[in-house]
Image: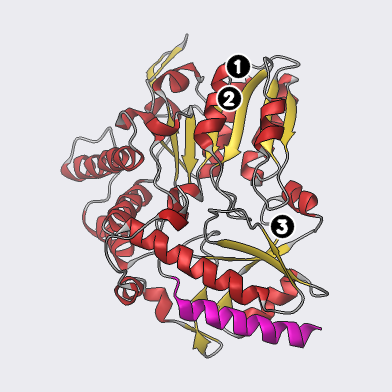
Amino acid sequence: MSVATITPATELDLAAIRAQFPILARTIHGRPLAYLDSAASAQKPESVISAMANFQRTSYANVHRGLHTLANEATEAFEAARAKVAAFLNAGSADEIIFTKSATEAINLVAAGISQSLKPGDEILISELEHHANIVPWHMAAERSGAVLKWAAINPEGSLDMKSLAALIGPRTKMVAISHMSNVLGCVQDVAAIVAMARDVGAQVLIDGCQGVVHLDVDVQALGADFYVFAPHKLYGPTGIGVLHGKPEALHRLPPWQGGGEMIEIVSKEKITYNVPPFRFEAGTPAITEAVGLSAAIDWVQAQDRAALRAHEHELLTHAMAALRGVNGITLYGTAPGKGGIIAFNIAGAHPHDVAQVLDRYGVAVRAGHHCAQPLMTALGVTATARASLAAYTSREDIDQFVQALEKARDFLL
């Protein structure tokens, strides 16, 4: 659903939201912090910070095999986090949720497993929009198996070219791996249509939801993909943990990836037998405290009026795009209808790294570089861009501070 079509049930109390994020009280070089780098990593509300600290103070222990009180409390908290993620994504069961150390690791887990069943000439389909985390593991899978990597193109406004994708899907396609929402351009893909095309040829689908889960309502049963991946640190949660959702049949087809504790049933000198999913894919001590933080982050998100948040984001995005078009020398990348709150741009004659550094002097935090999306940069005809990204706590004042600072950066650099 496009954010433009959403009517909020209530008016957003932005001041109350911002008050829950302690870091927003900071000043940078004597100026208020305008944090516009949430696509890289979102700031954390006090409830997430406190949940992790309180768990460490009162209930920390290793999980699953302990018999003492602290171990039982930690295990209950860890598995409650798994159940909460499952409910958040509308998964069929908590057993469909695997915790990894990052979204990148989650994609690598799937790619490594899939590569064992690929044959020379099989095809893996990705797109020019992808983050390197959804490119490099598939390159590696192709190198290991002799499979071929195919690339769907983008349209001029930055959206995925569905005709290009449809033309590439065929009987040799075994995996389609696509971002739900671009981390550079903010464009949203029609995941249900992509899944339907893949199903017609018997291919599996992995969706990189690192941006999608933040800006959209995600129902994995409705989307129908075999795998859905996201990074909690972009959803106001901690780093050091990733989430992989897999359909039961897809998870049972995957071989174990890493060996060690928890992923086994029996170990003897002669053989080993493996645990069932999700534990089969969670070798070693997991990110326990981080799972508690993720649980608190989901609580925080679900306590908000998400329709109001999306309407707020759309209003800010519309305001920002209009204001930026008035900046001389600017080029905006990604103008597809219904895009989320991510703005990639360049100033003619100025390197984006220099632009980002000057903006920082005015208290504005943006990202600059290739954004781990070098094939997309090539498709856009640039080596790098600057990127401003919005979140629940972004204000109109942040946008105005950004645009004013950008004009000063342009005048200083040119």
Q: Nearer the viewer, residue 242 or 174?
A: 174
Q: Say which label, 3 or 2, has the lower sequence index.
A: 2
Is residue 407 found inside the magenta-colored segment of the image?
yes
Q: Residue at x 35, y 57 (%)?
A: 307
Element type where label 1 sits in the image: loop
Tag 1 residue:
201
Residue at image mark 3: 370
Amino acid on which the number 2 mark rests in the picture: Met
Q: Residue furthest top?
A: 270
Is label 3 in contact with label 1 (beta carbons under 8 Å)? no
Q: Which residue is the site of mark 2?
A: 197
Q: Which residues are magenta?
A: 394-414
Label 3 vs label 1: CA separation? 34 Å
Question: Is residue 213 visible to the viewer in this orientation of the structure?
Answer: yes
The type of residue carrying mark 1 is Val
Outermost residue toward the left?
69
